[in-house]
Image: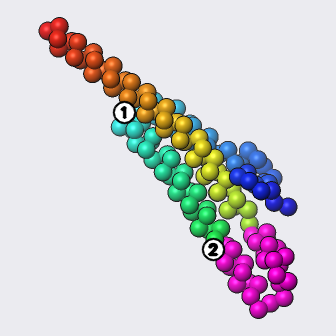
């Protein structure tokens, strides 16, 4: 039986948090890297997570079309047969879609935090350099 919403019913719920955990781990690791690495990560993490959501939606659409084709001309008994054909599919797609959506939810605030912190660091660095050149 499937639940509605972003988090599907899976045998091991911790599996849904692998992608968001990887995003957080890479974000923390990025603070010991260069500025360019942090900014690229801040830009690419939400874009990649959004791409995962789009990929999951496209694969779900393809899966539903295949289920509809399997029911065409056979004894599927309408909606009941179609939903049965959809439910017989493997749950990897649920994990991909849910993990990507959770990663997007995690990546967006981390991108905002990175952007704000780097902006503050840039302004402070500029003020310090301006003060040092004025003192010279």
- Residue toward you, 73 or 20: 73
Magenta region, residue range: 62-89
* Circle 1 residues within 10 Å: few <14, some 14–19, many ≥20: few
Q: Residue furthest front?
A: 79
Q: Which residue is mark 2?
A: 62
Up-down: is 63 above or below 28? Answer: below
Main structural element of the magenta stretch: helix, strand or loop?
A: helix
Q: Residue at x 59, y 41 (%)?
A: 106
Q: Residue at x 74, y 66 (%)?
A: 90
- Residue toward you, 84 or 34: 84
Q: Position of residue 39 (x, y in %)?
A: 40, 38
Give the CA distance from mark 1 to mark 2: 40 Å
State which quadrant residue 36 falls in: top left
Helix, strand or loop status at disc 2? helix
Q: Residue furthest top?
A: 135
Position of the N terminus, as image quadrant, is bottom right
Residue 32 in sight from this viewpoint: no
* Circle 2 residues within 10 Å: few <14, some 14–19, many ≥20: few
Q: Which residue is mark 1?
A: 35
């Amino acid at each position: 039986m499937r639940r509605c919403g972003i988090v599907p019913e899976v045998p091991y719920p911790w599996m849904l948090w692998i992608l968001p955990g990887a995003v957080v781990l890479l974000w923390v690791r990025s603070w010991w890297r260069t500025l360019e690495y942090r900014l690229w990560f801040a830009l690419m993490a939400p874009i990649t997570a959004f791409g995962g959501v789009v990929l999951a939606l496209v694969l779900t659409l393809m899966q539903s079309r295949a289920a509809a084709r399997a029911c065409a001309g056979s004894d599927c008994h309408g909606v009941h047969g179609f939903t049965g054909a959809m439910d017989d599919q493997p749950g990897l797609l649920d994990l991909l879609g849910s993990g990507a959506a959770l990663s997007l939810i995690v990546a967006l605030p981390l991108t905002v935090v990175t952007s704000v912190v780097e902006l503050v660091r840039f302004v402070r660095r500029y003020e310090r350099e301006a003060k040092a050149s004025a003192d010279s």
